[in-house]
Amino acid sequence: MSFDTPPSSSTQERLPEQVAFHRTELAVILSLYGRMVAAGEWRDYGISCLREVAVFSVFRRTAEMPLYRIEKRPKLRGRQGMYAVVGTGGQILRRGHDLKSVVRVLERKLIRAVD
């Protein structure tokens, strides 16, 4: 009986254990989060770092479903863009290559008419 060893792959080809947000990406997201908390729109958040996606979920109340999810999927980097903002029902509000332009769709919620 013979055992085949899997071919060794270089470190560049190896997939990461999990996807996470970089410090600069978190700075953009937390800046928006702070402004929305100050406006009274958002109250809580959660971060999930999984094998293929990193998710920043925003909640109005902790026990509810997330209002929005900001997702990072590196596999989509070459195609549609690795960043996406997903709404409550699962609809993709915006997708792109630049995180600042993608989260801009949520900044519009800050603009209100003054009575």
Image (cartoon, rainbow, N blue to C red):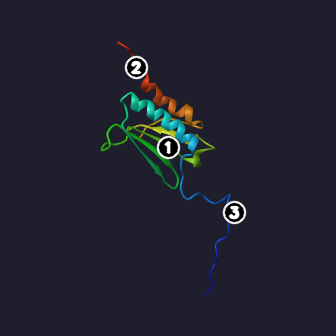
Q: Determine whether, in the image, residue 49 is placed left or right of residue 64.
A: right
Q: Name the image quarter holding residue 89.
A: top left
Between the C-alphas of marks 3 and 2, the distance is 52 Å
Name the residue carrying label 3: 10
Q: Give the residue drawn at x 48%, y 33%.
A: 32
Sequence-first disc among 3 and 1: 3
Sequence-first disc among 1 and 2: 1
Mark 1: which amino acid?
A: Glu
Mark 3: which amino acid?
A: Ser
Placement of 17 over or under 27, stated as above or below: below
Farthest residue, direction left? 63
Quarter of the rendering occupied by the N terminus = bottom right
Mark 2: which amino acid?
A: Arg
Q: Give the residue drawn at x 51%, y 50%.
A: 53
Q: Give the residue drawn at x 34%, y 43%.
A: 65
* Residue 84, position as x, y percentages in the image: 51, 39
Nearer to us: label 1 or label 2: 2
* Residue 6, position as x, y percentages in the image: 64, 72
Name the residue carrying label 2: 112
Specify the label residue 71 is tagged with: 1
* Residue 61, position as x, y percentages in the image: 31, 39
Between the C-alphas of marks 1 and 2, the distance is 26 Å
Placement of 57 over or under 39, stated as above or below: below
Q: Give the residue drawn at x 39%, y 16%.
A: 113
